[in-house]
Image (tube, rainbow, N blue to C red):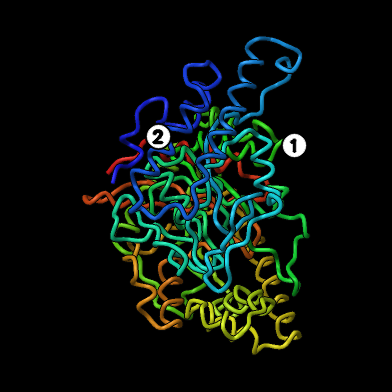
Amino acid sequence: MGTFASQPEPFASAVGLQDSLRRGDLSAVEATEHYLGRIAALPELGAFVTVTDETALGDARAADALFARWRGGDAEGQRELPALLGIPTAHKDIVDAAGVPTSSGSAARPSQIAAADHPVVAQLRASGTVSLGKTQVPEFGLTSYSENLVAAPARNPLAPARTPGGSSGGSAAAVAAGLLPFAPGSDGGGSIRIPALACGLIGLKPGLGTVPGDVTRGYEDSFGAPVLTVSGPIARTPADAALLMDAMTAPSSRGAHSDAVHRAASLTGLTVAVSSASPFDAALDVTLTAEALRAFSTAAERLAAAGHHVTEADFQYDPDYFEFFTEGWIAGLSLLEFTPEEESRLMPLTRGMRRRALARSLPQHRENAARMRGFAREVQLMWGQSDIVLTPGLAMFPPLVGEFTALSPDDDYALQCRWTPFTSMVNVAGLPAIAVPILSDAAGIPGGVQLIGRPGSEPQLLALAEQLTQDRAA
């Protein structure tokens, strides 16, 4: 399978594609046809569940018509063009795009044709993107791998026998293989950062509320816990991620992320706390591979070389985190209703976790939510003593496709947590974080790190990612 490194200009970057479209060197139809051709050529990647080729080509023709009016200078053409006009992307099959089936990765019920766009989808549609379809996800976005009973599993383009991660696994696989220039993902426990790390990409998890479409129903869930899931970009470079992030947060911060990446060389003097402690340590045997540690130490060295103040931190986490995070993670499954026949079609892990959630009373769910809010306050204060917290990325290589589902549900979940021990805590805290590739092993499997920032530091995190990736080496 090809990777992004083999992509010709102007498809090597989203920023370059945007420039080519605006100059008229390339039409939106030509760009759309290129990516649709890539999708058709790599069905074994399992990246897409639904491809909306006819609709995409229609949207591309409309984009070209708007470009023509803009260049012609008529009254409508005098208006500013949508920022991402004519640039193809795709959405996870867990969010609604009007007129397209949404399966949520579950075979329990038939896919439903969405009547309206999810707010983030609507924002990107208004920004001019051309959607090519829906990408593969785990059932209800529940796991850190993208396998379900709806369609073929998503595979990692860099190592096709392995998972690209989840839940934004199909999107990350598509970006890494050059099927898309970039893609929006969603992250409730690492679902942007995990696949980005697994596929050697940039993955930005914004702070809660940074993307307006994420908080249309408030900042707490039905039980009073912090909303965990936010939307953010998956891209090959920090500049591409910034371009998409600008569009996702417009109009309030339009351009701020791209400007920060452009000025990255001038960013220096930040305090960086370095820690490989995980809140899962008390409950699980979390062991980092030599490659994971090498990426971690290399990132710390690069940050110090860039003029930042890097120091070791002794972070201590609540030893009960594994228990109360797990209960909070699955609590929403208790709100889903299924007939016995539908329940029988759930994935074993989903079925077991839903039963566990149903066994808890409403007061228990609310008490657990309060513990999550308390944890959020504690780590915000602890991490906030520094500008940035640097942690390892993934603890080990991406597991093989089928490796998780071959285990019992409990062992499946435990392996997920041991593989991804640093991501979920950031969701509970509601803070921004970015996954950054640092190096690759001899087989081309990437190793990366996570940077956690203070509220509102998304532009700064992208600038740091730019600094770290300027000297990426094997």
Q: Residue at x 63, y 80 (%)?
A: 338
Element at label 1:
loop
Q: Which of marks 1 and 2 precedes in the sequence? A: 1
Residue 341 to residue 177: above or below: below
Q: Residue at x 46, y 27 (%)?
A: 30
The residue beneath circle 2 is: 470
Of the pair 22 and 320, the residue shown nearer to us: 22
Q: Position of residue 254 (x, y in %)?
A: 68, 33
Instruction: Indicate which disc residue 123 carries.
Output: none
Query: How crowded is the residue under tag 1: few (<14 C-alpha within 10 Å), some, or many (20+)?
Result: few
Residue 19 seen in this snapshot: yes
Residue 268 seen in this snapshot: no
Tag 1: amino acid:
Ser
Q: Is residue 420 left or right of residue 325?
A: left
> Can you say which quadrant of the picture contains the C terminus?
top left
Of the pair 2 and 226, the residue shown nearer to us: 2
Tag 2: amino acid:
Gln
Q: Quadrant of residue 471?
A: top left
Verify CB contact (< 8 Å) between mark 2 and mark 1.
no
Q: Is residue 301 left or right of residue 20?
A: left
Spatial CA span between label 2 and label 1: 29 Å
Q: Quadrant of residue 400?
A: bottom left
Query: How crowded is the residue under tag 2: few (<14 C-alpha within 10 Å), some, or many (20+)?
Result: few
Q: Residue at x 63, y 83 (%)?
A: 339
The residue beneath circle 1 is: 252
Residue 420 to residue 129: above or below: below
Q: Position of residue 137 (x, y in %)?
A: 49, 60
Q: Position of residue 208 (x, y in %)?
A: 68, 55
Of the pair 425 and 47, the residue shown nearer to us: 47
Q: Position of residue 420 (x, y in %)?
A: 45, 65
